[in-house]
Amino acid sequence: GNLTINLAGATLNAAAGTVDLNGDFNLSAGTFTAPTANFNISGSFTLTGGTFTHSSGTTIFDSTTAGRTITSGGTSFYNFTFNGAGGEWTLQDNLDIDNNLTLTAGTLDVSVNNYSITIGGNFTRTGGAFTVRQGTVTFNDRSKSSTITGSIAFFNFTSTTAGKIIFFEAGSTQVIGG
């Protein structure tokens, strides 16, 4: 089922385990502390208020159904993984990932609004599809190098941090169209 948190002052702390949510996640008031391990979501993610704390864990989208959305509400995630064959997630706002973005199955779409994705660590694509449209992918954390693994098409590819080191996997192809 779905998990909805809509009560000012309410706190749900899931930091000490793994959460496997077979539905949508909705946070409009209150606080949710994500697991330090995995937070699996088979539906949409919607943050319109309240506080989401990533706990340096991995948020995994594993739906096998298209039509899912991600509204981050300006919050940041730590590790962000798409692993649902046939699943499709469309951004509803800009996405900020402090560490790694991994695409193993399913489709991540920046939407016709061309929302941006900011990544502090690595971008790995071993399967699935990345629909970049005219969006921007920015690598921004100088404290760690970033590795781009797998063949990925970008529209706008930037690094806004002086001294940022970015590696590209040998044998893969990166296309920058913007």
Image (tube, helix red, strand yellow):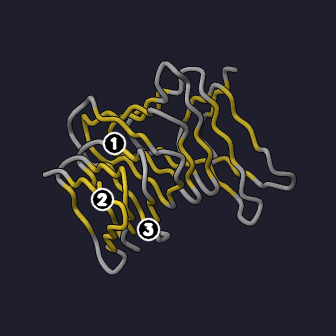
Q: Please report the residue visible at 44 percent of the width from the left and 68 percent of the height from the top.
A: 57
Say above or below: 60 vs 177. below
Give the residue type at disc 3. Answer: Gly
Where residue 81 appears, as percent x and y from the top left, is 41, 52
In terms of image quadrants, where is residue 40? Answer: bottom left
Where residue 73 appears, as percent x and y from the top left, is 48, 45
Q: Residues within 10 Å of mark 1 (few under 14, many from 20)?
A: many
Q: CA distance from mark 3 to mark 1?
A: 20 Å
Give the residue type at disc 1. Answer: Ala
Q: Earlier in the sequence, mark 3 or mark 2?
A: 2
Give the residue type at disc 2. Answer: Leu
* Foreground of the two, 65 or 14: 14
Residue to which mark 2 is pinned? 7
Q: Residue furthest right?
A: 162
Q: CA distance from mark 1 to mark 2?
A: 34 Å
Where residue 17 appears, as percent x and y from the top left, is 30, 77
Q: Taking 143 as reference, is 174 left or right?
A: left
Q: Taking 158 as reference, is 98 left or right?
A: left
Q: Please report the residue visible at 32 percent of the width from the left and 67 percent of the height from the top.
A: 10
Q: Earlier in the sequence, mark 3 or mark 1?
A: 3
Say above or below: 178 vs 62. above
Say above or below: 20 vs 151. below
Helix, strand or loop at label 1? It is: strand
Q: Please report the residue visible at 34 percent of the width from the left and 52 percent of the height from the top.
A: 27
Callout in the foreground (3, 2):
2
In terms of image quadrants, where is residue 174? Answer: top right
Q: Taking 166 as reference, is 133 left or right?
A: left
Q: CA distance from mark 3 to mark 2?
A: 24 Å
Callout in the foreground (3, 1):
3
Residue to which mark 3 is pinned? 57
Residue to which mark 1 is pinned? 105
